[in-house]
């Protein structure tokens, strides 16, 4: 077992429940991470205590999911999700159980979970309950469903995305029968809310194996959002050369999917997945930049900076560098480091200055554009007196 131990406040929750006569265990992702030697970000506990008993035992706790048996226990200003042992009924919507039933059996609770590596429990004294061989699967680096894969995916179609995301994140192989279950039930992905698909896809994109997106497409999990076709695996693999930032990775993915004819536009694809406006615009603008010839001068780069802004151009050039081996990002960094002007914000004169000269209406904006273009071409001339003389038509 890993040397990682739960923090004091988590142990206190376990010990308090056990002291009241209720079995209590760490469970799920925190146990998996502990066995992997990774410190968990969140700590989840399962117990034989009913929700109303939890609220009584831990005053000040919050009933965050009573219908599913979950109470957020507050302990020393920290929170721990504590859930009563339960079994679940059918999943009409292939995402949420129609009903849950509280039970006193840990094994019954673990049997409803998605993968064996997430169906392991550890008590406060370190005893492991592992009825489905999850610890051995972790050792073997295998992702395997608890029980019948097709049944697990019929219950919750999002588990298919989670299997591939865990594979990308952990470097684990998906068990053959689990993979066959994904293939058989891939059509159920159409029932999932776009926001859920978006979140899983984004988490996958931010791993060190973003090329796993190919499997999502190949298996048919993204059919609702894509035209027929397959993206180039070699290009998908180059996504890992991009910064691990969500907007940049989304823009890169849209470029690869667009090149394969899988999407008509970045805007349509990302809007369907409910991405925020800023990400949609960055990916769309990046597509436009990449479709045009590369800038061949500092003036052209500054014109792009003026039109799209630093973040979008940095994203687009990072994509071009990753996919083509170019080194345009280096040129952009050089321009930004130089402090040369490419926006009205850095121009040595303002609209108020032009108003003081007597310019009015559209003439102010037109003159500012003229002066900015002039300064971008002649960066050393971004001087107030010189620009005012140009604006007044009395250049000396």
Image (cartoon, rainbow, N blue to C red):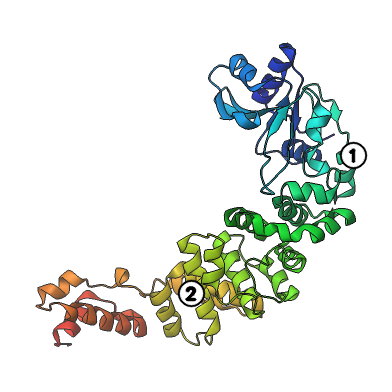
**Residue 206 in sight in this render:** no
Give coordinates of residue 301: x percent, y percent. Answer: 45, 80
Question: N-terminal of the two: label 1 or label 2?
Answer: 1
Side of 341 where 60 appears, left or right: right
Q: Name the residue located 85 percent from the left edge and 58 percent from the top edge.
A: 180
Image position of 396 with respect to 59: above or below: below
Side of 82 where 26 appears, left or right: right
How far apart are the alpha carbons under marks 1 and 2? Answer: 49 Å
Badge count: 2
Q: Name the residue located 83 percent from the left edge and 47 percent from the top edge.
A: 145
Q: Which residue is mark 2?
A: 285
Image position of 50 with respect to 150: above or below: above
Q: Nearer the viewer, mark 1 or mark 2?
A: 1
| Picture quadrant where residue 230 is located | bottom right
Give coordinates of residue 282: x percent, y percent. Answer: 49, 68
Q: Name the residue located 74 percent from the left edge and 16 percent from the top edge.
A: 22
Give coordinates of residue 213: x percent, y percent. Answer: 71, 65
Side of 395 where 189 appears, left or right: right
Side of 311 where 11 appears, left or right: right
Nearer to me, 159 or 152 = 152
Nearer to me, 43 or 357 = 43
Badge 2: how crowded within 10 Å, few (<14), some, or many (20+)? Answer: many
Any mark on residue 133, and which?
Answer: 1
Give coordinates of residue 1: x percent, y percent. Answer: 85, 34
Any mark on residue 328, and which?
Answer: none
**Residue 255 in sight in this render:** yes
Name the image quarter holding the C terminus: bottom left
Nearer to me, 327 or 35 = 35
């Amino acid at each position: 077992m890993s040397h990682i131990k739960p923090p004091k406040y988590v142990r206190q929750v376990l010990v308090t429940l056990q002291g009241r006569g209720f079995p209590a265990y760490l469970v799920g992702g925190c146990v998996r991470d502990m066995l992997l030697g990774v410190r968990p970000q969140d700590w989840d506990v399962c117990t034989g205590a009913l929700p109303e008993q939890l609220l009584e035992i831990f005053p000040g706790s919050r009933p965050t999911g009573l219908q599913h048996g979950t109470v957020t226990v507050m302990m020393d200003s920290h929170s721990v999700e504590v859930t009563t042992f339960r079994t679940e009924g059918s999943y009409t919507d292939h995402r949420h159980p129609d009903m849950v039933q509280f039970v006193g059996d840990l094994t019954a609770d673990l049997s409803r979970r998605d993968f064996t590596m997430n169906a392991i429990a550890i008590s406060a004294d370190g005893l492991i309950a592992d009825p489905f061989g999850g610890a051995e699967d972790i050792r073997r680096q295998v992702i395997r469903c608890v029980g019948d894969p097709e049944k697990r995916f019929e219950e919750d179609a999002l588990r298919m995305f989670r299997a591939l995301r865990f594979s990308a994140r952990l470097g684990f192989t998906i068990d053959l029968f689990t993979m066959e279950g994904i293939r058989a039930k891939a059509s159920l992905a159409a029932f999932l809310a776009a926001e859920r698909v978006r979140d899983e896809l984004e988490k996958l994109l931010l791993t060190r194996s973003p090329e796993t997106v190919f499997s999502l497409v190949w298996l048919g999990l993204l059919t609702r959002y894509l035209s027929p076709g397959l993206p180039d695996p070699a290009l998908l693999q180059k996504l890992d050369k991009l910064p691990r930032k969500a907007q940049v990775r989304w823009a890169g993915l849209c470029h690869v999917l667009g090149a394969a004819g899988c999407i008509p536009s970045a805007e349509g694809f990302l809007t369907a997945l409910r991405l925020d406006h800023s990400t949609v615009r960055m990916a769309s603008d990046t597509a436009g930049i990449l479709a045009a010839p590369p800038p061949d001068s500092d003036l052209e780069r500054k014109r792009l900076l003026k039109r799209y802004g630093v973040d979008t151009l940095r994203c687009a050039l990072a994509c071009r560098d990753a996919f083509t081996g170019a080194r345009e990002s280096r040129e952009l960094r050089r321009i930004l480091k130089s402090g040369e002007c490419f926006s009205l914000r850095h121009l040595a004169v303002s609209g108020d200055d032009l108003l003081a000269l007597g310019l009015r209406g559209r003439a102010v904006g037109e003159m500012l554009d003229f002066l900015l273009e002039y300064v971008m071409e002649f960066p050393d001339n971004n001087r107030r007196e010189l620009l005012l003389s140009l604006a007044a038509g009395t250049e000396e």
